[in-house]
Image (tube, rainbow, N blue to C red):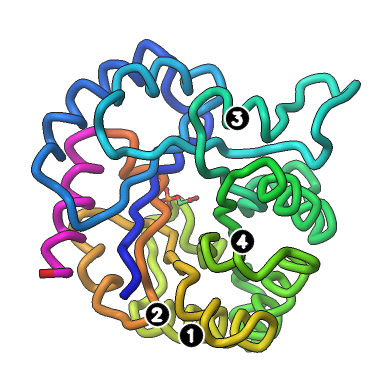
Amino acid sequence: MRRPLIAGNWKMHNTGTEAKAFGREFRTAIKDVDGVDVLLCPSFPALGALATTLEGTAVRLGAQNVHAEPEGAFTGEVSAAMLTDAGCTYVIVGHSERRQLMGETDDIVNGKVKAAVAGGLHPVVCVGENIEQRRAGETEAFVTGQVRAALADVAADAVAEAVIAYEPIWAIGTGETATPEEAEAVAGVVRKTVADLFGDDVAEKVRIQYGGSVNADNIASFMAQPNIDGALVGGASLDADSFARIVKNTEATTQ
Ligand code: PGA
């Protein structure tokens, strides 16, 4: 049985000061939750403040990006070792905003996944099609290719503990979600791809999230799908009360 994982991707929102206020409210709001893993991915500068404010809770900390090299002359970049030292256990890799706006190719994403794993971080690998690809019926082939490329040469035991977030680009920040059935169909394809590459045991363990306009009102419909093990939440993770309600509504679906 896979434990649900609800992750918040703050993108370029929330200063350290704002993260502290969030953390104080959030830790109280979720104090009775124990059936769901919770992950927060703030900006780099807010990691320390959030780690301090959430100390003693089970909330995990993650970053939104990592460099493929362990260290060196890469101005503005951050290594896996820096992230673990800052308290991270997860890192988002290959978010569509980075693929589209920062030119991250499948190869770059694969390099980052490998660096994350080598550095002891669990990658949250983002995949998902754009609206033209969906209309052209290319979703499954495209997402399968992204999964294959991102996980090339990654050890099976690391994949078992990784997370794959299926995020249709047209559903991100738009208020429009995939239907739970559409999301389930692609999540099933992702799990099958992992099974083909790494075997059934790994595919049974890897957690697959849906992302794209998830909120407290629609989370239960996604959690009801057999291949969806949680959500990667953008906008609705910025407010402590809203994110706590998503976590609690997820826990309610597991009971
Ligand atoms: P959203 O973002 O929940 O605001 O749609 C999701 C994401 O980009 O991870």
Report if residue 65 lies within the magenta region: no
Label 4: how many Cα within 10 Å (few below 14, some 14–19, many 20+): many
Q: Which residue is drawn at 57% across and 39% down?
A: 64
Q: What stretch is highlighted in magenta?
A: 240-254
Residue 160 lies, with reference to residue 247, above or below; the image says: below
Q: The disc labelled 3 sits on which kind of residue?
A: Leu
According to the picture, the residue beneath numbered tag 4 turns out to be 158
As helix, strand or loop, the secondary structure at mark 2 comes to loop
Residue 184: quadrant of the picture: bottom left
Confirm whether the magenta stretch covers residue 244: yes
The mark nearer the N terminus, 3 or 1, is 3
| Circles 1, 2 touching at the beta carbon (< 8 Å) | yes
Q: Tell me the residue that label 1 is attached to.
A: 188
Q: Can you identify the residue that label 2 sits on?
A: 227
Q: Residues within 10 Å of mark 2 (few under 14, many from 20)?
A: many
| 65 and 116: which is toward the camera | 116
* Picture coordinates of residue 63, whole percent (x, y): 55, 36
Categorize mark 1 by other alpha carbons within 10 Å: few (<14), some (14-19), many (20+): some
